[in-house]
Image: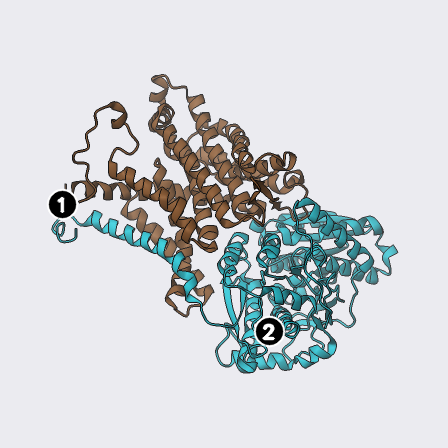
Amino acid sequence: MHRASAGAKGEARMQLKHFALGLAVLTAAPLTMTAAQAQSGIFVPLFTYRTGPFAGSGIPVANGLHDYLTMLNERDGGIGGEKLIIEECEDGYNTQRGVQCYDSVKDRHPVVITPYSTGITEQLIPKAAVDKVPILSMAYGLSASADGNEFPWIFNPPDTYWDGASAFIQHAANVEGGFAKLKGKTIGLIYLDAPYGKEPIPLLQALAKDYGFTLKLYPVPVSQMQNQSSVWLDVRRDRPDWIYLQGWGAMNPTAVQEAAQNNFPMDHLVGVWWSGSDDDARPAGAAAKGYLSLDINAVGPNFPALQDIIKYVVDKGKSQLSSKDKVGENFYNRAVMNAVLIAEGIRTAQKLTGKKLIDGTDMRRGLEAMHISDARWKELGLPAFAEPIHVTCSDHNGHANIFLVQWDGTKWVKQPGSIAPIHNKVEPLIEQAAQDYVKANTGWPKRTEACDKSS
Amino acid sequence: MLYREVGQYKTNYAADMAVFPILQDRIGIGIILFVAFVVFPLIGNDFLLNAVLIPFLIFSLAAIGLNLLTGYCGLLSLGTGAFMGVGAYACLKLTTYFPQVNIVVWILASGFFSAAVGVLFGLPSLRIKGFYLAVATLAAQFFLEWCFIRIPWLYNNSVSGAIEVPLRTFMSVPITGPTATSLTRYLTVLSIVVLMTWLASNLVHGRIGRMWMSVRDMDLAAELIGIRLLRAKLLAFAVSSFYCGVAGAMLVFLWYGGAEAEVFNIDQSFLELFMVIIGGLGTLIGSFFGAALIYILPIALRLIPEGLGLPLHPATVEQLRFLVVGILIIVFLVLEPNGLARLWQIGKQKLRVWPFPY
């Protein structure tokens, strides 16, 4: 064909060639992709988002997860002598792309999935039991999935969003001087209008009824994250006494800045733990002084394990971190905590099964028997980094105590003391919600997995 | 050499008007169907079926729907995403109230709800055209999206505000829900898409298609030769929305297995419009080309560095992907403003007369 038409007008032929090339690439690529991975080890895929509108929150999280697990590979040669295969899948915090990531890693037997998005988690929950891959959604995801009897494959320690919201109400009551003083107060919830943001609403509504405060809802659509003026107009009109912020990505710094501009008392603005990134408060700078955020992990780099990360990973250029100073930021440490849970789950699973190369089923048993005491946190090189974590077969959460951090204008400062979630309000609701979920999903599988004794 | 129509005589009108007048085309379509129905299910892994082929087919169907409206009838619409959403939510409500009816029936029936909504929002098309109509359909997009978020009844009051797809079986084989294998879902999607493409092909080659095309080319002339614009335009909206609705129902029930309203946002509408424009306005095959370029190309691009073993970070690949897809779209449109379908046609024409270039 080429020889014969060489003298002819070549334009259309060129077009055809481009097109054929494109088609060939299109059809060949998906077929060849799975062959690339053949090395042995424990496969831990990480769903990350370093791009898109949520990258501000996603980058420190991705770095923390990646760096701690890489540090285990570099320092200890993996876990129990078995290397970890760490691989990121970029999903841009987009549910559709996250499910795509899941499909692309599923066949390679990941031991655990870390979706880092409530929307993606909710999509994967029904698939987990079918594909035998546990999901670790640390302090995010479906609150009801804390019920291990109905959701044996889902783990969300150490706290659910409902624990968080109840801790916020507890804090408000402490400041106001008792739950009785909450009566007649107005409490606002500014939330991302997505599954993640809507999570605390049922609990806050229940508490509003019990304690007699008025709950005002201020949804912020994803497309309006950085333009919240209309929301804050409503806030000015309603004059809430307290505001609880359940935002993510670019929404958080905007909300904090708006609060400062509207002269809202910053110490009455409380963010959930995902609204407490350094980059959330930094843009407002000194004006955000006093802004409070719930937290489940310590801040700052002064922990032996974090120093090991700097020594083995960051200094060797194996991290994506732009600078060493980022180690110790709130979200970085949060992700390190998440990575510790993954590692401890693997370790527990290895101990339970006696196998080194574990699979998803073993990992599920490991996560279910996981117990990280204060002593264990210290052993891990992270003394007093977080509350003890205790997962049981029926309680996949633990409902640990939560503490507050406050922005001092340049960095987060941990506040003394911790707040217990209102257990007697949260836990019955979780059980109820789990039952409702099962009822709504006809054919939800009954738990058949045996229960291991906690280690 | 092989692609030549020498010796293929047409002895009656039916043969002359056939959709595939050349024998080789008929063989080609047979091979494509064979590959789709037999080869892919045999060799395809979960990733190929679930992350590539199922969404490709669904987006192709939605693109056909939009193409019927925009390409054949010349009415620009930005409400595709919302019409897909109507199909998905209608299917959820139908299967909630009548769980014993086969889900495939409901997926097809949900198209009628979408068609009704489409007709309603198509009414302004009688007075306005072009960009002005696009703005009017944009209202449909925003209004319906608002409904999907704000009316809890639509998503059965679930806490997360997302559609949760229940388990439904056909002859005791699960088709939807978490236990449905990607193979059964793929075959279901494929059957529906093939059937509806065949219907669309018959539609556009027949009286109705010609009616739409005459309205597209000059509606005043069409009116003068006795075409009732009201009927023609509303029919186009109805059929187009029907296709979009079925595609939307399949999107949620046979692919995602659960979805938020965000899936049906304005981006989805734009994506479908790009597919139609890049694929080729007023062609059915262009809808498939467009969907392949817009949907599969980015996935393939993401996998190429991995397949070649290049040590690129996923985030870097992601940035590169945006660049390359953008450039490719421009390249294709500059090469052939009438879309990939036109390129395909030129290629076929060249092959027919080869080795004599005309």
Residue beneath the point at 28% across and 40% down: B27
Q: Secondary structure at mark 1?
A: loop
* x, y percent for residue A444: 66, 49
Does residue A166 appear left or right of residue B354 in this picture? Answer: right
Does residue A91 appear left or right of residue A330 in this picture? Answer: left
Check the image and report above or below for A226 versus A113: above
Residue beneath the point at 66% across and 41% down: B156
Q: Chain of mark 1?
A: B
- Chain B drawn in what color? brown
* x, y percent for residue A264: 71, 57
**Number of numbered discs overlaid on the protein picture:** 2
The answer to which quarter of the image holds residue A296 is: bottom right
Residue bearing mark 1 = B355
Q: Residues within 10 Å of mark 2 (few under 14, many from 20)?
A: few
Residue bearing mark 2 = A355
Q: Residues within 10 Å of mark 1 (few under 14, many from 20)?
A: few
